[in-house]
Amino acid sequence: MMNAAVLERSACFDIGSLATKLFAEIATRTADVEGVSRPAFSKIETETLQFLAGFARSEGLAAQWDAGRNVVFSLPEHSDALQYILIGSHVDSVPRGGNFDGLAGVLAGLLCLVRARREGSRFAEPVKVIAMRGEESAWFGPCYMGSKALLGVLSAAELAARHKQDGRSLDEHMQAIGVDMAPVRAGKPLLDRAAVKAYLELHIEQGPVLIERNLPAAVVSGIRGNFRYKKIACFGEAGHSGAVPLAYRHDPVLAMAELLNVLDAAWHDFVAKGRDLVVTSGMVSTDQQKHALSRIPDSVEFSLDIRSQDRDMLETMHALVLKHVARIERERSIRFDLGTALWTSPALCSKTLIAALTRAAETIGVPPALIPSGGGHDAAVFSEADIPSGMIFVRNRNGSHNPQEAMDIDDFKTAASVLYQFLNDPNQAFHQARAASQTAKESGPMFTKITDIIRQKGNAVRAYHAAAVAAQEAAIADPDRAVGYFMLGLAAQEFADANYGEPLHAHVFDQELSRLDEYAGMLDAAFANPDADVRLRALSTVALGLVSHRRRPEEASSASA
């Protein structure tokens, strides 16, 4: 293993080469049987932070341990800045997880500082980068523990949570690595919120959207909130599978299936109306000691995780869950034990930061795109604390929380360059006034919700019909975006009508969805910008694209005649 201080310097700064070396070194230092394991508030996590601090100091940067035992990096001249932009993410991982989750955001910020130091650049505002502890819920149950402690919102119940391996409390683990727990227990912030002008986080995307849209990076509109039931138990009556007729059955598995089917149907209906929603039941099990092929189970346990960027949507779905639980209990003579619902509020990114990051991407030639985050991030905690927050996603294959995470280093370079451009641009609206701290009131990307309907309904003819209907409804409900909705709806309807009943290859649908995705992303990025000219140019570009696409079949038909 290399010492951080002896990583070779090339004559010309190459962020990709240096990032590759750092990722590889940390992966080696924290390797498990497969993947990496960097437990929250552990010796391994501390050693990772020490390595990063050593590397930063070797590059002439300031590296300081804060009250939460996180490491904060900056250019030397900004170490005592009274106000600053904070870039950060976490260094812990899930057990046997991927190396890029969290670490990519820390290294992106750190390498922006290294680049500025080597090139002698001056940022438009003082910048600090924080490498945080304890974001993952895999170790104790609660998530965002490090950032919650920083902002004074880590609860007593979370502090009492037990480590899943050694049984010691989170409070004990934090104290063991050197955190003064008195202010944490009292709910006092460990950093001055007023000093943080904005919080930015770069993170790998944990879903497939950027892969499907063939984009290296995107700006994030907001982070989905959720309510979760970790373990719902449904109790019925055991019996012989062949001897108990339908009229006498009290089958908990079928009761669970009915509930999930109702929620799945509601999910499809809401998505068709343009609402943001995802529904998951990730764990289902009957009692292994008793279950058998020919036995009606007497109980089944399952989880429920429902997420949306819209708080009203979450409330609606929660009411729906309770309503149908009561109905199914009556009709099937079974009993549900839901346990306690765990709620996390949605967190919208700053509208001004979205516009500024989008402009930074366009400046360096990155196609503008705006997508929601389905997974949770530390940025949500900063947003909830009324600190303007923004995020950049990097394309990543094979999901996250597994050793197969696959982020291309060129995509990382692209996303980090967007961040660097933002930090260096003195003309960004955000850098001009503190008024940029206002959080967006809109519910994130609006146009891409139309193309998401196509994707979620299976990218077939009926999906394009559903998207067209949703676009028409959205145009009526949102006059400011009506023209954009009208064009997307028209394109979806024309494609559906032209191909109804036709045997088409899947690649035809994929090409059409990719085209509409490009238009939707362009419109979302433009409408996140307050400049009316930017919006008008985007609408004109989409209109010209649709007209050009419509002419191609006509020209082909004329040529064949």
Image (cartoon, helix red, strand yellow):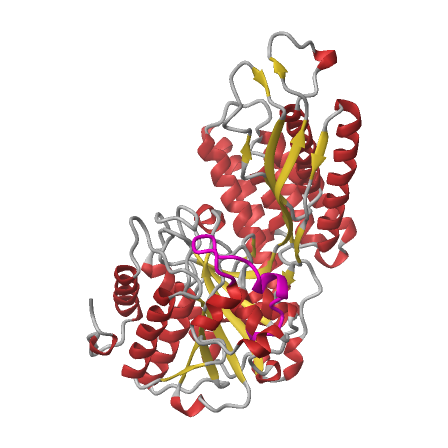
Q: Is residue 537 left or right of residue 336?
A: left
Q: Which residue is painted at 35% across and 47% down in the image?
A: 404
**Does any portion of residue 542 appear in the rendered image?**
yes
Q: Main secondary structure of the magenta part?
A: loop
The image quadrant of residue 273 is top right
Q: Which residue is painted at 60% across and 50% down in the image?
A: 448
Q: In this view, does 162 lie to the left or right of 480?
A: left
Q: Percent from the top left, x then y, of residue 200?
A: 52, 71
The image quadrant of residue 372 is bottom right
Question: Toward the viewer: 56 or 66?
Answer: 66
Q: Is residue 150 above or below residue 502?
A: below
**Does any portion of residue 361 appear in the rendered image?**
no
Q: Magenta span covers which residues?
A: 150-169
Q: Percent from the top left, x then y, of residue 91?
A: 41, 65
Q: Percent from the top left, x then y, of residue 34?
A: 30, 48
- Would you say residue 356 sits in the magenta stretch? no
Q: In this view, does 178 lie to the left or right of 531?
A: left
Q: In this view, does 329 lie above or below 537?
A: above
